[in-house]
Image: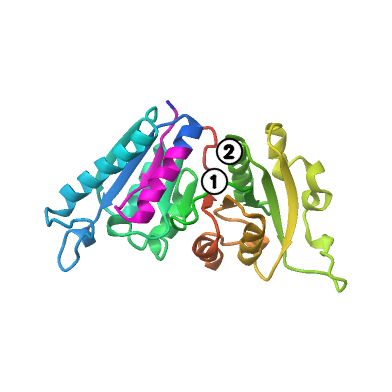
Amino acid sequence: MNAPVIVGFDGSATARAAVHYGAREALRRGSALQITHALGWPVILPPFHAGYDLLGQGPRVAMLELLAKAAHEVQEEHPDLAVSTRLLDGPAGAILVDASRVAQLIVVGHRGAGGFAGLLTGSVATQVAAHAHCPVVILRGDDHLSDDGPIVVGTDGSSGSRAAAEAAFRQARLRRTELVLAYHSPRKSSAGAIATSTLPFWATVGDSAAGAHGVGARYPDVEYRTEVITGESAAAALIAFSERTGAGLLIAGSRGLGGFRGLVMGSTSRTLIDHAPCPVMVVTAGHDADR
């Protein structure tokens, strides 16, 4: 069987939405779904309290019950999907990074509680996005989980951009939807036209370049187009373009050049993850697209 899709689960509404999102991804990929919770010290020591432990039976027992309930709900909706659960002791970031070694996709909610609290506001987000061995999808909330709309991938010619393009073409094939290769240009000429001297060759010639880094040639069944997007920053341009096109997924590499430099480690990644109008997939340069 293919490597599983792993969902970080903490019992919150966003985490439950992530489970259903992950289930759809697992079905597309012909893989199993694994629902994982990290039981860290903040939910088991006073004065902290696990919000899902309403009966005071202890966070471990309460979470095991929530995990079982989430798995049951998914299997009722998708009877043919293999679903398993795991409860592991330790910090969420380290557990997710370690789990990504045997996963083909990690799915987490934008905000949650318990073991994944603050996942996208501190070191955990940076650790997972920068070091995961597979793509990571961050959901921004249960009102941003539609799979409809084109897939948008930010590309700039870097090795991270190549990995993102590979993941994007594969995702477009799985969803049977259009793919847009978006290159950010911060400058315009005095007449308002894009300064083409700032663009890479493939961006100036458009679709004839056979997709970012030639990846498109390996996916002849995927419909794609190239767009040059402008804005004060790469993140702002990608967010505006995703809103305008009704994107179903925004994909970017973990590190890049030019407008995408420091995508995960700096402000650009925080802006995309916190403000994109759709789920965001972050892809590291070394991930294995064939898992």
Residue positioned most to the top: 1
Residue positioned most to the front: 77
Please give the name of the residue rendered at 53% of the width and 43% of the height, measured from the top-left corner.
286
> Is residue 12 inside the magenta stretch?
yes
- Determine which quarter of the picture holds residue 190: bottom right
> Is residue 170 inside the magenta stretch?
no
**Decide: marks 2, 1 in contact (CB < 8 A)?**
yes
**Label 1 residue SS:** loop
Q: Position of residue 14 (x, y in %)?
A: 38, 55
The N terminus sits in image quarter? top left
Q: Is residue 29 above or below residue 6?
A: above
Question: Neighbour class for label 1 at 10 Å: few (<14), some, many (≥20)?
Answer: some
Is 105 positioned to the left or the right of 224 in the image?
left
Is 22 positioned to the left or the right of 198 in the image?
left
Q: Which residues are magenta?
A: 2-24
Whichever of labels 2 and 1 marks the residue nearer the N terminus, that label is 1
Q: How is the image coloured?
A: rainbow
- Determine which quarter of the picture holds residue 126: bottom left
Q: Position of residue 171 (x, y in %)?
A: 58, 40
Q: What amino acid is found at the position of numbered circle 2 in the picture?
A: Arg
Q: Position of residue 75 (x, y in %)?
A: 34, 34
Q: Position of residue 53 (x, y in %)?
A: 18, 56
Residue underneath mark 1: 147
Residue underneath mark 2: 175
- On residue 230, the disc is none
Q: Would you say residue 219 is visible in this rendering?
A: yes
Q: What amino acid is found at the position of numbered circle 1 in the picture?
A: Asp
